[in-house]
């Protein structure tokens, strides 16, 4: 995704960034993923090259390693965040925000996971932008 300047994550399984690193979240391949290490909470932060307005997003977890108690946060606007409730499935899940968020730094926070050890696996994230 050309608008994304940087991605940072809470952890990577076995510190193997080549196989399980953050860039896999936006590479468009269903064969690659970001796989966190054990522990909670886990998070993924996206920095954009310019201000954007996000009206929603699509996210694909691996079943058994999905986020629970999930929050989408806008770090540009103080305290702007929205909880979302993902399912423990492999398919792409779409979430629309109750109010679009404008800024250039956003993150997903996963307080817990469907995995007993707190691991999260994400195959992809796609942001839905408000073009109005």
Image: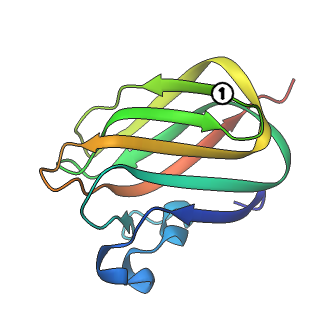
Left-right relation of 6 to 121: right
Report the colour scheme.
Answer: rainbow
Residue at position x 55%, y 67% from top? 27
- Image spot of residue 40 (x, y percent): 30, 51
Q: Quadrant of the C terminus?
A: top right
Left-right relation of 23 to 53: left
The residue carrying mark 1 is 79
Residue 27, compared with residue 131, is above or below; it is below
Q: Quadrant of the N terminus?
A: bottom right
Image quadrant where residue 37 sits:
bottom left
**What is the residue that sits farthest to the top in this orientation?**
98
Left-right relation of 125 to 115: right
**What is the residue that sits farthest to the left in this orientation?**
116
Dot 1 lies on which element? Answer: loop
- Image spot of residue 35 (x, y percent): 34, 66
- Image spot of residue 55 (x, y percent): 68, 27
Residue at position x 71%, y 22% from top? 100
- Image spot of residue 88 (x, y percent): 22, 38
Q: How many numbered marks does the figure carry?
A: 1
Residue at position x 38%, y 55% from top? 122
Count neighbours of disc 1 (C-alpha within 10 A) and say few if under 14, some if 14 to 19, many if 20 or more: few
């Amino acid at each position: 995704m050309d608008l994304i300047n940087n991605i940072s994550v809470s952890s990577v399984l076995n510190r193997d960034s080549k196989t399980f690193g953050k860039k896999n979240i936006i590479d468009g391949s269903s064969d690659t993923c970001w796989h966190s290490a054990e522990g909670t909470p886990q998070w993924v932060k996206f920095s954009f090259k310019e201000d954007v307005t996000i009206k929603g997003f699509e996210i694909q977890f691996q079943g058994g390693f999905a986020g629970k108690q999930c929050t989408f946060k806008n770090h540009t606007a103080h305290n702007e965040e929205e909880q979302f409730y993902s399912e423990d499935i492999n398919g792409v899940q779409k979430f629309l925000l109750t109010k679009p968020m404008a800024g250039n730094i956003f993150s997903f926070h996963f307080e817990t996971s469907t995995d007993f050890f707190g691991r999260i696996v994400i195959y992809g994230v796609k942001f839905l932008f408000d073009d109005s």
